[in-house]
Amino acid sequence: MNQRKKGIILAVITAVMWGIMGIFVRDLTRFQFSNIEISFFRCALAGASYFVFLLITKPKALKIDLKGLIICILYGAVAYSISFVSYSVAVSRIPVGVATVLMFMSPIWVAILGVFMFREKLEKSKIITIAICFFGAVLVANLIGAGDIRLDGIGILAGVINGIGVALQILLPKFFAKDYDRDTLLVYGFLGAAFVLAFGLDFSSVAMHIGNTPTFNLFWDLFGIGILCTMVANVACVKSTQYVEATTTSILSALEVVVGTIVGFLVFHEHLTFLQMVGAVIIVVGAIGSEIRKES
């Protein structure tokens, strides 16, 4: 398998893992877990699990100096903590569809910042692909023909910040890769984010929510958000940038919108309009089609 195919597969794994996250988040929400509590468990479990994994398979990745540790904590705080919290703020103040589209602006931020950070070429084909996938996301979010949509300034700002945060999750590990191992950045980034989020927790409420959740649901949901949808997803995302451009990784991550829509239909029995189905097809054709053209 060539390097580019590895990068594409890793990016698709990222999209699938992020796309199924709603299954676990909705169940935890049913047992009164707050958004910040869910974000904390995502980062804490991902960080602890990846730490143990690296301790067994790659212990040298855990060695870090004080400067590197500070960089990792800042990376976690900016890319994960702020991103997760800003998305929660966005969906609480503006329609989920609008928040989803603002989050999907991340490929645009990656493309723009990639020019300055890595001197990646902003090719015409990339711009067209981003535009196609963005239009598909608008259709999937059901914003066309939805009537009057009430927008809130703070909610819009939070959505934009979330999109930038998602972009930084992809860009920053690649930016610091010349000085620090990607695995080092990831593991301490997760733990740094958990440390920051812990300041916003009411631990008595956390204990109550844990106690009120059936054991199977608790372990299954925490495994889902912490291991599958955070550790596996974000490690795959960052590793993908070793083999393909950051912009390519972000474009392929758009498939998350499609996977999330399918999950909503199959698991939560959400109604899909014709335009939403068309939007999903557009995203798949736009994201995958652009890579097929490069391979040919």
Image (cartoon, rainbow, N blue to C red):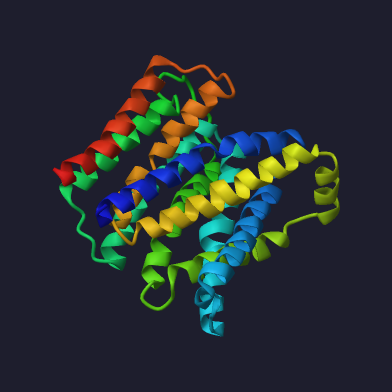
Residue at point 60% right, 57% down?
46
Residue at point 46% right, 20% down?
146
- Nearer to me, 227 or 163: 227
Given the current orientation, which residue lies at the most extreme left position?
296
Q: Is residue 283 left or right of residue 162?
A: left
Residue 9's x, y, as percent?
35, 47
Residue 160's x, y, as percent?
46, 48
Q: Dividing the image into 4 quarters, which one contains the C terminus?
A: top left
- Nearer to me, 77 or 294: 294
Residue 33 visible in the picture? no
Residue 211's x, y, as percent?
85, 44
- Look at the picture and state if 28 lies above or below 140: below
- Look at the picture and state if 37 lies above or below 217: below
- Nearer to me, 119 or 60: 60
- Which quadrant of the structure image shows residue 245? bottom left
- Nearer to me, 139 or 181: 181
Residue at point 50% right, 48% down?
157
Residue at point 40% right, 78% down?
179
Q: Is residue 104 left or right of residue 53?
A: left
- Look at the picture and state if 7 lies above or below 187: above
Residue 75 visible in the picture? yes
- Look at the picture and state if 29 lies above or below 196: above
- Which quadrant of the structure image shows residue 197? bottom right
Residue 35's x, y, as percent?
67, 45
Q: How many marks?
A: 0
